[in-house]
Structure formats: C-alpha cells, structure tokens
Image (tube, coloured by chain):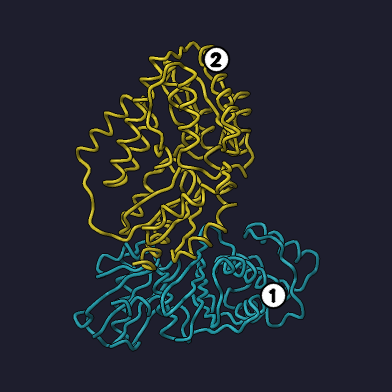
Amino acid sequence: MNVGYLCTYTPKELIDAAGFTPIRIFAGDAQISLATAHIQSYACSQARGSFERALRGELDVQAVVFTRCCDTLMRLADIWERNTEMKVYNLEFPTRVEEKSKEFYFNELKDFVKVLEEWGGEVTLESLKESFSLYYELEEKLKKLFSIKPDYDTAKKVQEMNVRDAIKLVDERLREAEGEDKKPRVLITGSVCPFVEVYKLFEDAGFALKDDICTGTRFFTFNTPPRDIGSVDEGLRFLVEKYFDKAPCPTKHFPKDDRFNYVLELAKDCDGVVFLLLKFCEPHFYDYPQLKERLEEMGKKVLLLELEFPIASYEQLRTRIEAFYEVIA
Amino acid sequence: MITAGIDIGSLTAKCALMRDGELIAYKVIKVSPNLEETARKVFQETLKAAGIKEEEVEKIIATGYGRNKVGFADKRVTEISCHAKGALYFIPTTRTVVDIGGQDSKVIAIENGKVAEFVMNDKCAAGTGRFLEVMAAALNLKVEELGEVAEKAKRATKISSTCTVFAESEVISHLASGEKVEDIVAGIHEAIASRIAAMARRVKIEPDIVLTGGVAKNRAMKKALEKEFGMEIKTPPEPQIVGAVGAALFA
C-alpha cells in the first residue's frame, strides 16, 4: 500500500517500517478545476492542486497522513476524508517545538503505530532499525549530491518512490554529478515548489543555487544520526528527536527563534536571497517582512517571487530572475 | 562607436541608435506576432532615419519581453536594468523609475546609479496601459484623448474596482447613472495611480521620480501620480524609448 503525505515533518520511517511506501503528494500540471467545488480559491494552490490530483484519480495512494503544519493542510485533511475513498489520518505534530512537547509527540507516534497496524501494517524493532538506516543513508547522500550541485529533479523523484529505489537513484546521480565554477550564489527560500523548471530559470540566468525549500533541502536536512535502539518505544523516542531537530519551517514555533537563525545562517555565503512564495501561504508571508529586513541588514539583496501552481508563465519569472542577476552580478 | 538598443515590448518595438553615448536616431513601431521580424524592421527603419549602414553599428543590445527572440543581437539585458540606465541618461538625478507599459508596469529603485530593488506587475491589466485602452473603448474615446478629457474634470468619480473587467462595468454603471464623462476619466486616472503607488510602496521611493513608458505621454496620468506620491514627477522628452536607449548604453 502507498501512503501519501504532504509535510516534511511526516515520520516516513514509521510508514516504511510498517511495510508501506510513503509517497509525497505534489500539485500537478493540470488547471485546478474539480477541487474548486470543495476548497475556496484563497487556499494555496499546493493544497488545491494536490487535491485536484486526488479527485482526478492521478494518485496511486490508498491512504494519506496529514501532519500538523499550516491550517490549510489541516482542514484539507477533513475535505480529503469526505471526498475520496482513501484512508486519512491526522498526525498532531506539536506547533511549539520544545522540551515540554516531546512527551506529547511520543504518544502521538505510539497512536500512529496503532493506526498503521489497523491499516494492515506491522512495525517491529527490526523493520524500524532498517528504515532508520535507509532514510539516514538517503538523507546523507542527498546532502552530498546537493553539496556538489543541487539537483531538484532527483530531489523531487526520490520523494515519490520507495526509499530503497530512491537510494539507487541518488547513487546513480552521484556518479555523474559535477561541481560548477564560481558563480553568484542565490538562496531560494519558501514553501514547496515541485516544478523543477523554476530552478532551471535561476541556473539559466547564471546563478549557483542553494535552497531552503520544503521540496528541496528541507526534505532531507536532519541532524540526528541513527543510534542503537532496544525497543520500538526507543525508536519512537529517536524519531521525536530527529524530527524536532530537522530543518525548521515557519509553521512551527521555536523558543530560540530557530527558523530565522536557520535562514540567516544559510544566507551568509549567498549574494542574494529570493523568497519563492506560494500565493496565500500565510506562514511564509507573515515571516517575510521581518526576515527581509534582517537579510537586508546583512547586506543581502532580496527579491520576492510569488507563485501559483500550475505555473502559467515561466517567461515572466525569467525576466525577474534575470533582472535580479543583473542587480547582483 | 555606434550602438543600437532594441526594446521589444508587448505592444510597441523601439530602437535607439547612439554614437559615443549620444542619441542620434530612434523609431517606435507596432509589434507584430513575429518578434524577430519586428526587431529587424524597427532596426532598419532607425538606420534609415539616421542615414547609417548596418555595418557601422558595432553592438546591438536587445531588451524587453521579446529580447530572447532578437537573434541578431550581441547581448540581451532585461528591461529593468535598461529602464534604469535609460532614465539616468535623460535625467541623471533619477532615484525611482515608474514605467507604465502596454501590458505591465514596474517600479525600480536606483542607488548609486545602479538598480537596488524592483517590483513588477505583469499578471494583471490593472495599472497598465491596457487598463486605459479598455476604459477608452468603454467610453468611446481614443486612448490618446483620455489625458485631455480628464483635465476638463471638476471632480474625479471614484472607481473602486481594481480588476480591469470589473472596473469596466463600474464605468458603464457610472455612465448610466449620469456621471460626466470627464469626471469618470479623471477617476480612471486616479485608479491607475493608486494601483501603481500601492506597488511602488514595496520599494523605497526617493525623488527624483521619473515616469517612463508610453503612458507617460498622458499629462493627466502624470498629475494623478504626483498627487498619489505627493511629489513632483519628471518625464523624459521621449518616455517610450527609455528602455531602448538604456539597452544601447549597455554595449
């Protein structure tokens, strides 16, 4: 069985350990039509576009896990449950990511294991160990690949396949990957962008890329290597730590302002920062004015690009990106 | 050295010929669907006007949304950089460029003679020349007449809709309720000015503000923008060719 998910805070390891394949759901190329009967037009096109694909029967998933992130995706869970044949589960990831909420999330994961079992899966100590080690391998290899040269086509593909095949694909790409000469570097920050053509526009303009995108490095930037575990519960505690210390996203609150610090650190060796924001994405847009100010204080040039899926005109984006290159270079 | 700047916009194509950084000739023609051909045509016409042979031109720089379709150009530069450079050529004290083109509008902030920041609207006809064209058609006027008509107005009728299509119905309903045509036209200019100002506020607006693009020829538009910004606005002698001049200077 394939289990769909939308948010990078979803513990894919558990789904894999239960014997299912976690598959990331992205918006597609088709105009959003069927979904408009169920979702208002001021919800982001990632939510509407993903649901559109479900209604069109384009998704080979039999269940979907919604992990608490933004309000839109949480409410999408209810709409999805009512209007598709898929099984739907809400996983409550704490909004405040801090010591106090660890126990809560541990219990959430225990409940999720039970749900996976109800769906016909089985999480054992052995299967959990294997999944932990596989995902760690994938994440480290993607980090390596991106350190040579970011590869958004591969990053997108691995999120839509079984982790075992994903590792093979990244291995293949690693054999061919070549670094590039020194170029002005741009940090692309924002929510999701599964349309790899957009990154190509930046490369065409002459930029070297770095990203803080949910479908890019935030998918694989974790900081907790697997350790020896003696029970499933210990494994769940490991997952709590791993996901509490991943690349942070603006739908979460951190006592020490981890999100801003993370972006500012990434921007240090970049010549400019582009906010690639999805229209109506509240979590990212609320951060934008303050984050922009902080980046400008660091002397970085900043550009805001607002997207809507499917992307109607690449040429308009191209002009802005080329002009931004001319401003920097 | 003679250089040429070719600006292929959405509605018009412009070419400027410069000798050692001085403008010697220019032409503005309508764009046909074949952009390469349009570029050739405007280039040839400008050469003819200047009495210069093609071989004498050392560098050709293309800009505008059709820049990538000008195969014979030596280099391509975006209209953002070209408008800034062109505005500085005509008015060296330029700090903010407001360009209202046929199908897009942009605001460019200049610091130390370079582009510091820019915003663009090209998703929607509001705040572009297209908005004026639609309204002129609804009022049975020529777009060139709008400025003159607006200057006769005693007051400006409020146009609340941002969307061009809705604003058109609003204009028609104002006509039906007996509002004077000149007041409605004045209201249309205010609506565009407020839309442009809303976009401009996303960058730092510093004087001098320079208005470029075909719409800059319309005096009522300039006045409405001055009211909205609370500052005097300057216009170059030929606002339509600012991008082409800037391109020629990038050689």
Looking at the picture, which amino acid does disc 1 mark? Ala
Between residue A223 and residue B29, name the one nearer to us.
A223
Q: Decide if residue A55 is on the left or right side of residue A173.
A: right
Viewer-proximal residue, A212 or B161?
Answer: A212
Rendering coords of residue B154 (x, y %): 76, 81
Residue A33 sits in which quadrant? top right
Give how far across and how far down residue A107 sits, in percent. Answer: 58, 22
- Give the label on residue A235, or none: none
According to the colouring, which chain is yellow?
A
Disc number placed over residue B186 in the picture, else none: 1
Chain ID at mark 2: A
Q: Amino acid at mark 2?
A: Lys
Decide which of A283, A312 is in the foreground and name it. A283
State whether residue A159 is above or below residue B81. Answer: above
Rendered view: A27 above or below B89:
above
Residue B81's spot in the image, x, y percent?
40, 72
* Colour used to depict chain B in the structure image: cyan
Determine which of the numbered discs, if any, sits on residue A114 in the image. Answer: 2
- Mark 2 lies on a secondary structure that is helix
Count up the numbered dots.
Answer: 2
Q: Are marks 2 and 1 in contact (CB under 8 Å)?
A: no
**Residue lying at 45% horizontally and 14% vertically, measured from the top left:** A123
- What residue appears at the point 55 percent right and 31 percent down from the top-left corner? A67
Res B237 seen here: yes
- Chain assignment, label 1: B
Q: Residues within 10 Å of mark 2 (few under 14, many from 20)?
A: some
